[in-house]
Amino acid sequence: MDTILIFIIIILVASILQTSTGFGFSILATPFLLMIFEAREAIQINLILSLVISCALIYKIFKDIDYGALKRLITGSVAGLPIGIIIFLLLDMNKLKLSISIIILILTLLLIFNVRIRQTKGRDITAGGLSGLLTTSIGMPGPPLLLYFSGIGSEKEKLRATTLAFYLFIYLFSLLIQVVFAGTNKTVWVSSGYALPFVMIGLYLGQLLFVKINQYAFRIFTYIILLFTGFYLLVESF
């Protein structure tokens, strides 16, 4: 019973975060789902529910999408997706988590101290590639996009819309790759089904929260999520 309650809270809070910011579900849910499920199950549940959220929200955000950046992100992710599943199947996950955590923490500190980068087509493609790699390897596509869009000073509406549109592609293909190459089981789909009502509640509450967050608060919230992710992966790697 305690496990079920923890699962419900994780899904509800992560859904609110994803809806209100455009990037929070996998960053928040994956670490905690890994405490309840085995790695393959946690990643696939995350992918399924994130895909549902993206599908539910996409019709509301068309006008805010940066379609040029979206196209380049998808182009980059096509190369990153197969590399990620190879990492998931063959490499030491602890070493991967350690490397990712250090990179996230360093880059987040640079952002906090107001170091900014200029958006280019090549960097769009690179961010998409890294996001694709992390999606199929650890189920967390958000950190590269969040770091990149924060670094270029993207408005919160554009960040949320472009990342959600990108997730619609990346989560679908990542889920297919995971199922084909890593397999799946009944627990993944039954647990995802149980979670859907709480995802819907999170969608509603997240929309209410989004309109109340100003750009400054959004940026601070972004840094907190990144620092949490970085420290979590660092601890997990040990």
Image: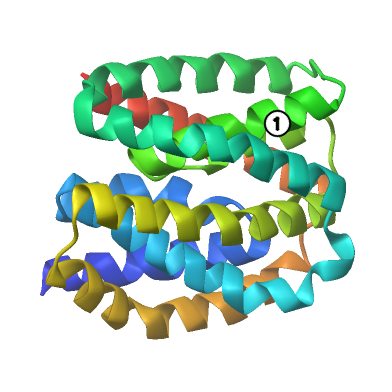
Tag 1 residue: 125
Q: Would residue 47 be found to the left or right of residue 155 on screen? A: left
Where's the C terminus, which quadrant?
A: top left
In this view, the residue in front, 113 or 117, is 117
Q: Would residue 118 be found to the left or right of residue 72 on screen? A: right
| Residue at x 65%, y 59% (from the top left corner) | 164
Residue 62 place in picture, x, y as percent: 82, 69
In this view, the residue in front, 84 or 229, is 84
Numbered label tally? 1
Indicate the quadrant where residue 138 lies. top left
| Residue at x 62%, y 18% (from the top left corner) | 107
Where's the N terminus, which quadrant?
A: bottom left
Q: How is the image coloured?
A: rainbow
Q: Would residue 136 be found to the left or right of residue 125 on screen? A: left
Q: Is residue 6 above or below residue 235?
A: below
User: Tag 1's secondary structure?
Assistant: helix
Q: Would residue 76 be found to the left or right of residue 197 on screen? A: right
Residue 211 place in picture, x, y as percent: 79, 69
